[in-house]
Amino acid sequence: MENMKRSTGRSSGSVRSVLSSYVLVLLMVVSTIIVCQLRVNSLQPKLKEIEDLMRENKLAEEVAHARRDRRGATDVIEDFSPPFDGGLSGGAMFTHWGRHACAEDLETVYAGKVGGSDHNKHGGGSNYLCVPTLNVTWDHYVDGPNSKTFLYGAEFENPGTGFFSTDNTQAIESIQDYDVPCAVCRVPTRRSVLTIPAWTSCPSGWTQQYRGYLMAGHESHKGRNKFECVDRAPDIFKGTYENKNGALFYLVEGVCGSLPCGPYIANRQITCVVCSI
């Protein structure tokens, strides 16, 4: 009997030992699975990046393949199409109202005189144009009044005293009744140009091209014109002094009450600045 007890005790100990081993192995397996899962989770962002790159490479290959297939029909077009550079070398355009030419660091596309519709006519255009005075060319034409829409030259009207500098007026003290010059300018290193009324300087980060006064047609005249910013130190066309009264440039004044009073003073002339970025 005593031998049987000892034998039974040894068997129970062996079972417990085996069970302990199984439990230990199971714990090791579970811990290994948990560690692997944690590693997989930590690799998910990297796997996502790899998948995205593979997608992009596949798309790039498809685009390149499509371009190769297209080459036969578009060789000439593509040879003359420069690569897109984001518009950085495109340059921004603006009209410099009141000057014969653009600043030295800009490109003068062309220069001329301001033109527009007659100030006392109901019809015609509602904008001022910078009209070239050199290399004017014609296509088909019939001389004589046919279309009944005419383009007139523009002149300064009632410019007041002290508003415009005489630095560029060739010793002429008043710009009254002189033709208005203009120049179309390209800013090679800029992408946008903005005219801001009622400011004399540009926002931070912008470059000032010029500043001056807002001008347009008289409010009592039949014609309507756009507001334009005219340089405060204008050039003039010497020898053009004559009261022809085609398109006219008047200083623009603020109306307190319609515009907010305080910032705007009744009958005070409105400044302007042209900025690029």
Image: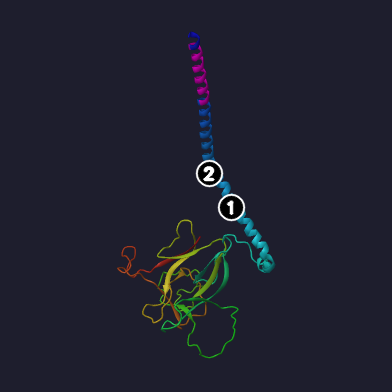
Residue type (three-letter) at the residue carrying disc 1 = Arg
Instruction: Return the x and y of residue 202 as percentages of the image width and height.
Output: 45, 60
Residue at position x 57%, y 69% in the image: 108
| Furthest residue toward front | 1
**Could you say which disc has been placed on residue 157 in the image?**
none
Instruction: Return the x and y of residue 246 as percentages of the image width and height.
Output: 45, 82
Label 2 residue SS: helix
- Nearer the observer, 50 or 266: 50
Residue at position x 64%, y 62% in the image: 66
Residue with the mark numbered 1: 55
Quadrant location of residue 88? bottom right
Residue type (three-letter) at the residue carrying disc 2 = Pro
Instruction: Tell me, yes or no, whether the highlighted magenta stretch contains residue 97.
Output: no
Report the Cα–Cα distance between label 1 and label 2.
15 Å
Question: Label 1 crowding class (10 Å Cα cut-off): few <14, some 14-19, many 20+?
Answer: few
| Furthest residue toward top | 2
Magenta residues span 5-22
Label 1 residue SS: helix
